[in-house]
Image (cartoon, rainbow, N blue to C red):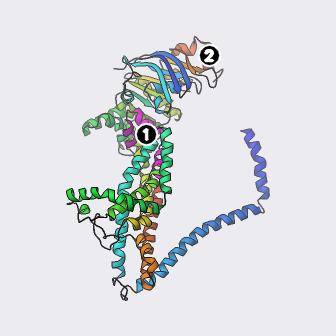
Amino acid sequence: MSTIDASNKPAARKTVASGSGRRAGDTIFSALSVGSGLIIFLALAAVAVFLSLQSREAIEGSRELTGSADAVSLLEYTGPLIFGTVFAAVLALLMAVPVAVGIALFISHYASRKLSTPLGYLIDLLAAVPSVVFGLWGGVWLVPRLEPLYLFLNKHLGFIPLFAGEPTAPMKNLASASVVLAVMILPIITAVSREVFLQTPRLQEEAALALGATRWEMIKSVVLPFGKSGVISASMLGLGRALGETMAVLMVMSPGFTYSLHIFEVGRHQSIAANIAAQSAESTGIDMSRLIFTGLVLFVITFVINAIARAIVSRGPKS
Amino acid sequence: MPQAITVEDLNIYYGDFLAVENVNVVIEPRSVTALIGPSGCGKSTFLRTLNRMHEVIPGARAEGTVEIEGQNIYAAGVDPVNVRRRVGMVFQKPNPFPTMSIRDNVLAGVKLNNKRISKSDADALVEKSLKGANLWNEVKDRLDKPGMGLSGGQQQRLCIARTIAVRPEVVLMDEPCSALDPISTLAIEDLIHEMKEEFTIVIVTHNMQQASRVSDRTGFFNIAGTGKPGKLIEIDDTEKMFTNPANKQTEDYISGRFG
């Protein structure tokens, strides 16, 4: 103890001595970091202001129905887009989460270290694939291969509204878009879940094992309850990505503007992001303003989703 | 019926590192055996081989035989899960399941072993186990409250209740009082005295007074130096170990000359 005190004292004195005038380095560094923080905030605010201002024309003109090509109100225009966006993202989430949790558990609790490390890298690599590549792969390779499955489900489980309707080739429908989205959000959900599962206190795991739990029982009674909030927030992050994903949806789904539940039907759905990408080059005036309004809606949706995710993360695992 | 544990030629490894060498010992049924020795001498490692918890650590393994009720738990085809259902364990730090109520904590092991249990049977078992752990009077009015809401000493007794609820033959305790205050420690020690009527108990402790208070027999582990394997130096009746040990190392240790 005494040696620690002795070594601390000179350092403490030094700080006190220089306390009157702050060092230049400290001032510059703190100004730089505060500035960087502000830039993030300003950029976000600038986007929000831009979206709000530019969409005003559409909001105010929504009742007048100016002579644009498809004379529908703003609500009629935006509604199906919100529906399509959320529908595709939620379907993707439903497919991705169980698989991601399975992979994460495999990496954290089943695989040997020799296998789990490369597998982790591989998952991260999947996150690095550009979305346009996923779009190409989905549209060219995946869609024809999913066709038999769609036809099978449509024929035998057609009484379920989701699988009903009349699928037509090429199957560039909401189901295909969701599958591609699911693959794209798999890495983030897997990575976050894996981290949380690895943090499970060893003592808790051993408590379960010492009671005679099998590995699966241990995971069920200890790891999953501990990681629940982490998996939920990981899913929210994935959902946020799926909502905003543009290229893959654009390339895999042929657009339509309805509230159809039939995920195998082509030309029924469109997402906000893909719609903006497809239309913005040729839009001016009120059409452009309407696109920007849909962008504002997407911005708000993803913002809320992310905020929820953060709130769940900060609440943290129960300890 | 509690059974003797017979350990023969047991070598315990972490990967290629031999941590504990050549243990031969017979642990009597319905008795308390304390294991003492300096840090890192392998007494906890040895304890964890008695219910095959040692191998939970990647790369860890044990060679030799440990017979409980005439069955070698390291024989081929023996499922460690079944071994752990017969040999319960209490850990250094209290570790109740944080998401479960007091009641569910007690029933956790039973629900694993025997999925269906009627509510009246469950209630009876919870009461019996908590009484067996001297905790019933303190928690009977708040069984549905989280186990984490209890004090450290109560949590440890809850862990003991959880362990004895599955009716093991042997209960292993790995420094069960090292995270507890003296009052809670006394409560656990009293409990150990009562528990030996029904169970064979092996306890690792750093506290020699505790060993002399609770145990019938005491084993002394020692290590020749860093990187060398730990060894069981001597095991005998506790009274003899603390008054007239056969081995010079034991005498040095218990008289406080090292460790």
Which residue is labeled 1 in the image? A110
Label placed on residue A97: none
> What amino acid is at disc 1?
Tyr
Tell which of A227 and A106 is nearer to you.
A106
Q: CA distance from mark 2 to mark 1?
A: 43 Å
Using the rendered image of the protein, determine whether residue A195 is visible from the camera's viewpoint: no
Q: Which residues are magenta?
A: A192-220
In this rendering, the answer to whether A265 lies above or below B30 is below
Q: Is residue A209 inside the magenta stretch?
A: yes
Q: Position of residue B121 (x, y in %)?
A: 26, 35
* Res B37 quadrant in image: top right
Q: Position of residue A65 (x, y in %)?
A: 35, 87
Tell which of A175 and A37 is nearer to you.
A175
Tell which of A250 and B98 is nearer to you.
A250
Give the quarter of the figure containing the N terminus of chain B.
Answer: top left
Using the rendered image of the protein, determine whether residue A259 is visible from the camera's viewpoint: yes
Q: Chain of mark 1?
A: A
Which residue is labeled 2 in the image? B249
What is the crowding at mark 1: few (fewer than 14 residues within 10 Å), some, or many (at least 20)? some
In this rendering, the answer to whether A22 lies above or below A286 is above
